[in-house]
Image (tube, rainbow, N blue to C red):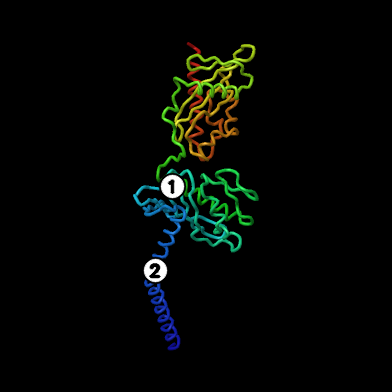
Amino acid sequence: MRLEFRMVVVLTLIAIFSGFVLSYTYISTRNDIEKNAEMAKKNALVKVLPATKDYEEKIIDKETTLLIAKDENGRIIGYAAMTEGAGFQGKIKLMVGFDNTLTHITGLEILENVETPGLGNRIEEDWFKEQYQNRVPPITYVKGKKPEKENEIQAITGATISSKSVVKIVNAAHEKLRTFLKINPSSQPCDEDSSKIGEKTDKEIKTIIEAIKELVPETKEITKIDDIFIVQDSGGNKIGYAGIGVGEGYNGEIKIITLFDISLKHLKGIKILEHCETPGIGSKIEDPEFLNQFTNKVLPLKEAEIDVITGATISSKSLIEIVNKVYERIKKELKK
């Protein structure tokens, strides 16, 4: 019994002593650890936004911290997100920088990762990180070939999951910053008079005529009456009506030309004339594959009949609304 008691006492003393040593070690090194972490954060911020002289920090959620980068005059030069997400083996923590409109990535730094040595941890290699510079989010990845689009990066051979994880983390950070900052990114602001339908210049009229002929190649003559363009074939037969439409998109006004059949029952097609939507996201409304969905649709358009662009729902729905407004306007004008 005495032996057992002694063993308990000895083990208790060892546990107390070990706890004391660990606590003392943590307390004595805590300041150094925090200083090193702060230094690593500042170094990463300067790497992704080199002109940074000062910054303001805001916590978005438990995974993401926003760093507002400023120059020597206190002007905002960009934003960075210190964030993390799941990789192949565990958490990947990174710093990603964006310009002050959130339209382009300025740089990427990997802060921590436990990916497979020689494979997944190649996300730390300069060539992989440098791919993100000047890319337009949201980012996608390609395998076994060089990127061809402004939003593409090349995945690491044999480490696709790790590469994909970084892409996913970067895109999530971009979306969080957009929501938190309430910024509608755009690389080019709309012209002040881009939405005006009246008093068209000769150049604008020429652009509209070319757009109509592109939608209906058999067009031979176009007559303008008020805001309606009457489209005729080589025999002088009316084959449709066209009209200009303007509406509010996600980041500004969208201007389109719409072409309807002679019965005003079907949409023959649409073409984007001007827009200020986000490059790489909202700008996808110009993609032929997306616009082809509108061809031969019954009027008025219904949202359920059009597959909206992922990440650009507002831009997509705006087109539907604009088409229907032009349709109602022309129908009303022709009944006069």
Q: According to the image, label 2 marks what residue?
A: 32
Q: Amino acid at mark 1?
A: Leu
In screen coordinates, is 244 left or right of 154? Answer: left
Q: Position of residue 276 (x, y in %)?
A: 47, 34
Q: To which quarter of the image does residue 5 belong?
A: bottom left
Q: Residue at x 60, y 50 (%)?
A: 154
Q: Position of residue 13 (x, y in %)?
A: 40, 81
Q: Residue at x 40, y 74 (%)?
A: 25
Q: According to the image, label 1 marks what residue?
A: 177
Q: How many marks?
A: 2
Closer-to-camera residue (55/2): 55
Q: Amino acid at mark 2?
A: Asp
Q: To which quarter of the image does residue 163 belong?
A: bottom right
Outermost residue on the bottom side: it is 2
Outermost residue on the left side: it is 73
Crowdedness of circle 1 by 10 Å Cα count: few (<14), some, many (20+)? many
**1 and 2 marks in contact (CB < 8 Å):** no
Earlier sequence position, callout 1 versus callout 2: 2
Quick one: quadrant of the N terminus?
bottom left
Closer-to-camera residue (328/14): 328
Closer-to-camera residue (76/182): 76
Q: Residue at x 44, y 44 (%)?
A: 178
Q: Position of residue 311 (x, y in %)?
A: 51, 40
Q: Residue at x 54, y 46 (%)?
A: 139
Q: Is residue 284 above or below residue 218?
A: below
Q: Mark 1 falls on what kind of element? A: helix
Crowdedness of circle 2 by 10 Å Cα count: few (<14), some, many (20+)? few
Q: Is residue 114 above or below residue 60?
A: below
Q: Mark 2 falls on what kind of element? A: helix
Q: Position of residue 330 (x, y in %)?
A: 50, 17
